[in-house]
Amino acid sequence: MVMKKLLELGFKPVRGAYDFVYEHGKDEMNDHDLIGAILEISNALHATLKGFKVLYTLDTQRAEDVDHALLQDIDEFLDSTRKEIRDLEGGHKQT
């Protein structure tokens, strides 16, 4: 249920040092806008998780400074690799 709530807020599951990331989608923000965005998502996160008895931490970093991979990208890569293997195996079957 917690994972569903995080996904609804726009968080994305990742593999790496963190479990989820939230990207606000803007390339450049001034300090005032950045502070407002952080407060907005942290308030929404707190309200959403209230009552679930979970512990969480928030960390703000530039996306390119964090070593992580979106699980969706990993899944797509694995699906593509599996398809390539199936195609190769299918081409080498003897009839």
Image: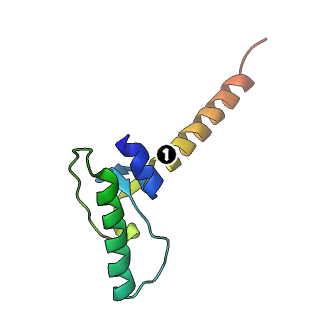
Q: Residue at x 35, y 87 (%)?
A: 32
* The C terminus: image quadrant: top right
Spot occupied by residue 79 in the image (x, y as percentages of width and height): 58, 37
Residue 30 x, y percent position in the rendering: 39, 88
Residue found 74% across the figure and 26% down from its top: 91
Q: Nearer the viewer, residue 50 or 34?
A: 50
The quadrant in which the N terminus is found is: top left
Q: Residue at x 33, y 50 (%)?
A: 19
Residue 4 lies, in percent from the top left, at 43, 44
Q: Is residue 55 left or right of residue 63?
A: left
Q: Is residue 83 left or right of residue 21?
A: right
The number of numbered badges drawn on the structure is: 1
State the SS at label 1.
helix
Badge 1 is on which residue?
74
Query: Where 27 falls versus 75 (above or below)?
Result: below
Q: Quadrant of residue 52?
A: top left
Which residue is at the front of the view, 7 or 62?
A: 7
Three-letter code, disc 1: Ile
Q: Is residue 52 left or right of residue 78?
A: left
Q: Quadrant of residue 86?
A: top right
Give residue 48's quadrant in the image: bottom left
14 in relation to 89, above or below: below
In the displayed image of the protein, which residue is found farthest to the top? 95
Q: Residues within 10 Å of mark 1 (few under 14, many from 20)?
A: few
Give the x, y percent position of residue 49.
30, 51
| In front of the other: 11 or 85 | 11
Q: How is the image coloured?
A: rainbow
